[in-house]
Every structure is written in structure tokens, then in C-alpha cells.
Amino acid sequence: MTKTSRFEIHADPWLSLHHLAFHYARNDSGLRVRGYTPLTHDDLDAFTPDVVAAFEPVAKAYEPYYEMSLLRSAPLRYSSVAIVMGGVDSLEDPALKQALIDVMPVYKTHFWDRHEAAAQRLIDSFSADLHHHGDDMARRLTDYLESDWSSEPMRVDIVPYASWAGAYTGTRPVNHLTIGALQDMALDSSFETLFHEASHASPMSDQLDAAEKAAFAASGLDMNRYWHALLWYASGRAAMETLGEPYQPIYVTSGRLTDPKWGPVYQSLDAVWDEHDTLQARAIAAAKRVVALQAGTPEENRSD
């Protein structure tokens, strides 16, 4: 476990097994499920016939969860929290608990050394980045979001595979951040990912909803999860300013900046950010610019 003033970072074998087994089981089911998360070649190669046979009971135990999300579905979300807070014995699903207990020796033999090493590399990277840049990043991000960090460090768990996006943050029943150590989407911009995900939780996220509502009221824009674009832009800009060149924020490397739907939002935020001093004013100005772009209003006639 690595602990700083803002984060408490863990690599727990039970939580790692839980995530591996869930993704393996639903991937192997043949169902066309949302949030497909591929495994690495090394892990796929480790599923020899004997290992597959050992995982059959745990795959069966996950069948009721195949259509669920690790973040948004309460049974899976609370399963992760139960493991984090009280260990595998705290799981409420007896079939799942027993299946994980039975397969753990196989996991330890064929997977854990590799997963633990990957987790430790990421933890070491976080430790170095937080030592050199953590305070600057936090200062910029709290300024942009007009919020502050919790007085208690946020629990972060490094697992082999988090979600299709490489990381996710749950806020109920406790704030808890999960990052996949074997997923490129999380690793390529891991420092920004850490702060972005942590900012989903209160108190860092407290002003986003109000900024979105004010922007919609002032501009007429109606765009689902506009608040998330505000967060992506704020965390990306803070990371870019903190780390310097040649770092590029996730909203650039992920293609959001040129996406037909979201590109105008990020381009507009970039255009108006330095012209305003508050999150709400920036959100309103960018929303007005997006509406003007959607309407095809000439640049010189825009009111933002």
C-alpha cells in the first residue's frame, strides 16, 4: 500500500481476481455485452485447458452479472466494495464467494505474479509523479473546478482490468477509484487519469452540475454529460500545464477533440477558457459557442 495526502493506493489479489474473472467469464460467454474488455495475450495464453476447467465454476457464478456494469450496477459495485472493505468473506453472494475462494490458488499460480508486477510498476510511477507534480496538479485542478480535495485520502485499487475505459470511480457507498494496470487507455495518461477519476467524487465534483445547468439555461444547449466534458477539459488542461510539453491531454489523444459530436465542445472550451475566470462562466461561454456552431452562425456574429 502506498499512501499520500490525497491517495491510498492498493493492489489486492482478491479484487484483482474479481475483475479478471468477471471480464474473462463474460468475454468467454459469447454474448454481445456492452463494455467488452479484452485480456492481454499473456493472460489469454495462461488459460490452458486445465486453467479453463478450474475457472468454469467461477464463470458460472458470474452468469447473473454478465449484463451488468462494474460501476453502475449495484450488485457488482457492492461486490467490489465488500472485497475492499472486508475481504472476500464479506461477499453477499455465497456462490460467487465460494467460487472465488476455490479458484484463488489457480489465480495465484498462473496470473498473480504478473498482475502484481504490473500493479507495482504503476504504483511506482504514481509515487514518482505525485512527488514531483502532485501539489501543482491539485492546485490547478481545484482552481478550475472551484472545489477542494477531501480531507481523507481516496482509496485507489490497481487491478489488471478495470472497465472498458481502463478506469472508473464509484461514489456509493464509498468513494473508490479502480485503474487497470494492463490497459493502455489508463496507462498512456495515468497521471491525468488518476486526478480525473478522483475528481468524479465529492467535493471535487460539487460544482459541475450547477455549471452544466447554468450553461444550458443561458445557451439552450441540450447535451447529455456536458458536465463530463467540462471535467475532461479541466483535468486535461491542468495535466498539460503541470507536465509541460510534449504531454497531450486525454481529450486530444482519445479523439474527443475531433469527434463530430464532442469536438465542437472541446474546441469551444479551448477558445473561451482564458477569457473567463469561473467554471460557470467558462461553461456558459463554451455552450453558447457550440450552439452557434450547430446553427452555422458566422464567427463575427457570435455573442460569446
Image (tube, grey):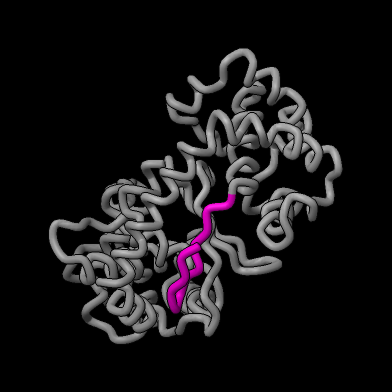
- Closer-to-camera residue (227/216): 227
* Residue that sits furthest to the right in the current view: 94
State whether residue 227 appears in this view: no
The answer to whether residue 37 is visible is: yes
User: Going by the image, does 65 lie left or right of 179?
Assistant: right
Residue 23, percent from left and from top = 60, 35
Q: Residue at x 29, y 86 (%)?
A: 277
Residue at 61% across, 33% down: 107
Does 130 appear above or below 74?
A: below
Toward the top, the furthest residue is: 49
Specify whether residue 2 is painted magenta. Answer: yes
Give the image location of residue 126, x and y in percent.
36, 61
Give percent across and percent down for residue 168.
53, 55
Given residues 291 and 274, the one toward you in this image is: 274
Residue 235 is inside the magenta segment? no
Q: Residue at x 48, y 77 (%)?
A: 204
Q: Quadrant of residue 66?
A: top right
> Where in the figure is residue 121, as x and y percent of width and height?
36, 50
Name the side, left or right, on which 277 lies relative to 90: left
> Residue at left 81%, top 38%?
98
Segment tinted magenta in the rendering: 1-12
Residue 59 vs 272, above or below: the answer is above
Count of numbered marks = 0
Quarter of the image with the C terminus is bottom left
Quadrant in which residue 301 is drawn: bottom left
